[in-house]
Amino acid sequence: MSSKEKVFINGDLSDATSAKISPFDRGFLFADGVYELIPFFSNKPFLLDEHYLRLSRSLQKMEIKNPYTEEEWKSHISNLVETTDLKNFYLYIQVTRGTPELNGVSRKRDHVYPEDYKSTVFMFLSEITLLSQDDISSGQEAITLEDMRWYLCDIKSISLAYNAYARDLANKKGAFESILKRDNLITEGSSSNIFIIKNNKIITPKSNNLILHGITRGFVFKLAKKMNIEILEKDITYEDLMNSDEVFVTNSTQSVVPISVIDGKKINSGSAGPLSLELSKNFISEYQ
Ligand code: PMP
């Protein structure tokens, strides 16, 4: 961390090394909060409005107060962004239900919360390191795992213990991502959305409460249409996944990542498939 790195907390820019949030914050005690992650490429936000819309929806669904208007958010964001020399980075935004008080005293730890609380807003910036072209062309390895999360995965909740467990397990096994499945149906990756390609059609699970409605996922729909490739939202079984022609995952920091091996079995003879590679290439040229 650079010594002059700034973070945003509740309206103020502070030094990252000395910034403070109460340990009684409900984000810390209950994971009672939501977050958003917005990529900036060459210092420009990518799909800022879409990310802002998802943040306000997550807040609404969790009934957490949104402390700022859209204009205030944008002004706070640009003040923070002005403090960095980074070119490719992400902005992390976390909004929690804060530290509710009762008669002027912190409630410490109480499941119940009063109506008059002040949300905590925390934002920081961090560099994005993109996968190399070689890593994209060879495709990445994934494992599959039972999806044991709650049923509100469309909310970008900070309660990410299972996602972190799944991603860490993949990492321990030398893989890039864990693909989650619920009752034999594929949902998404631990931190990505999933797509398969079969007979030149792109298929991805439906955008219901079992997956995060990825901003990159939405952009892939637009790209596919531009490229005249049919794209469908449909159930994907474990067998569909393993017998697909190509597989790729998407998220804001890595865009489109081809998957070439799943549970030790090769997909598309063990390297990135041609359509996934084309999507990845077109994606990159859209934001550069
Ligand atoms: N699903 C999960 C569980 C994620 O954590 C992410 C990344 N935040 C995604 C999907 C992809 O979403 P996005 O394209 O908006 O980054």
Image: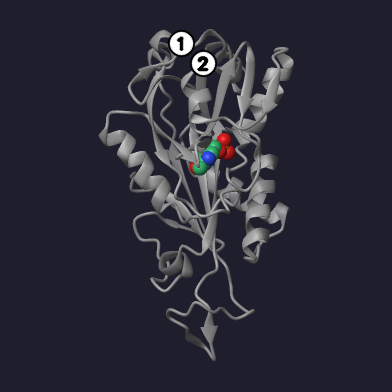
Q: Pick whichever, 244 or 95, lies toward us.
A: 244
Specify the amino acid type for callout 2: Glu
Q: Element under label 2?
A: strand
Specify the amino acid type for callout 1: Asn
Residue beneath disc 2: 246
Quarter of the image where the N terminus is located: top left
Badge 2: residue crowd in 10 Å (few <14, some 14–19, many ≥20)? many
Tell me residue 225's x, y (percent). 73, 18
- Residue 45 visible in image: no
Tell me residue 275's x, y (percent). 57, 11
Q: Is residue 65 left or right of residue 100?
A: right
- Residue 210 visible in image: yes
**Residue drawn where x is 47% and y is 69% of the image:** 26
Q: Is residue 137 left or right of residue 155?
A: left
**Residue drawn where x is 58% and y is 17% of the image:** 197
Question: Which numbered tag is attached to residue 268?
Answer: 1
Question: Which numbered tag is attached to residue 154?
Answer: none
Tell me residue 187's x, y (percent). 54, 38
* Gap between marks 2 and 1 measured at Cα: 6 Å
**Do the residues under discs 2 and 1 have CB atoms within 8 angstroms?**
yes
Tell me residue 269's x, y (percent). 41, 8
Mark 2 or 1 closer to N-term? 2
**Residue drawn where x is 43% and y is 78% of the image:** 109
Q: Quadrant of residue 169?
A: top left
